[in-house]
């Protein structure tokens, strides 16, 4: 009714979303010292979904505040957990293994909190 082409807007939104996801996975990979551009997108989806679910989103409803809150909680937990894990296992080379265990544990917790029907 306003004269806007909705289909063209959707196409532009999908293109912008894909470009931002590509840049995000490159920054994510660079943060760990490697750039796996072929398998990188496979590693990106579970932490993103976990962050959104931790932020309070449900299967039926999610908004930007859930995403921002979830990312801060997820990354804050990852940032705070690593020094604690390094102190617990002093003298070992378990930092990357502990990061994966903590990250996958948070993802598992977030995914198990979704109840059937979309309610938390």
Image (spheres, rainbow, N blue to C red):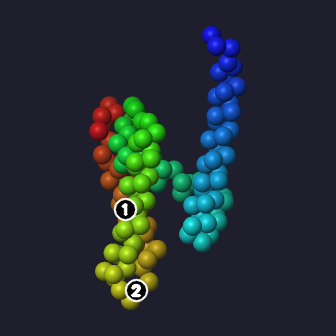
Q: Secondary structure at mark 1?
A: helix
The N terminus sits in image quarter: top right
**Residue 66 location, quadrant:** top left
Q: Position of residue 63 (x, y in %)?
A: 44, 36
Q: Is residue 53 above or below residue 13?
A: below
Q: Determine the residue positioned at 40% across, 64% down.
A: 78
Q: Is residue 117 visible?
A: yes
User: Do tag 2 and tag 1 residues touch (Cβ < 8 Å)?
Assistant: no
Q: Is residue 66 left or right of residue 9?
A: left
Please state which of residues 2 and 6 is positioned toward the viewer in this rendering. Answer: 2
Q: Which residue is mark 2?
A: 92
Total count of labels = 2
The C terminus sits in image quarter: top left
Q: Is residue 6 left or right of residue 50?
A: right
Q: Is residue 104 visible?
A: no
Q: Secondary structure at mark 2?
A: loop
Q: Is residue 18 above or below residue 29?
A: above
Residue extending farthest to the bottom is: 91
The label on residue 91 is: none
**Residue 86 location, quadrant:** bottom left
Q: Position of residue 91 (x, y in %)?
A: 38, 89
Mark 2 surroundings: few (<14), some (14-19) or many (≥20) residues within 10 A: few
Q: Determine the residue positioned at 65% across, 51% down.
A: 22
Q: Determine the residue positioned at 32% across, 53% down.
A: 109
Q: Position of residue 16 (x, y in %)?
A: 66, 40
Q: Which residue is mark 1?
A: 77
Sequence-wise, the earlier of marks 2 and 1 is 1
Mark 1 surroundings: few (<14), some (14-19) or many (≥20) residues within 10 A: some
Q: Determine the residue positioned at 30% across, 46% down.
A: 113
Please state which of residues 39 and 58 is positioned toward the viewer in this rendering. Answer: 58
Q: Position of residue 39 (x, y in %)?
A: 61, 59
Q: Is residue 12 above or below residue 84?
A: above
């Amino acid at each position: 009714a306003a004269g806007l082409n909705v289909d063209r807007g959707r196409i532009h939104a999908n293109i912008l979303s894909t470009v931002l996801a590509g840049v995000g996975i490159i920054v994510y990979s660079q943060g760990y010292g490697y750039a796996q551009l072929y398998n990188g997108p496979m590693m990106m989806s579970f932490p993103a979904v976990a962050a959104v679910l931790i932020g309070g989103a449900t299967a039926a409803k999610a908004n930007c505040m859930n995403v921002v809150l979830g990312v801060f909680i997820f990354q804050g937990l990852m940032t705070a957990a690593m020094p604690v894990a390094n102190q617990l296992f002093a003298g070992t080379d378990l930092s990357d293994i502990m990061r994966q265990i903590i990250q996958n544990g948070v993802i598992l917790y977030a995914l198990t909190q979704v109840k059937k029907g979309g309610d938390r």
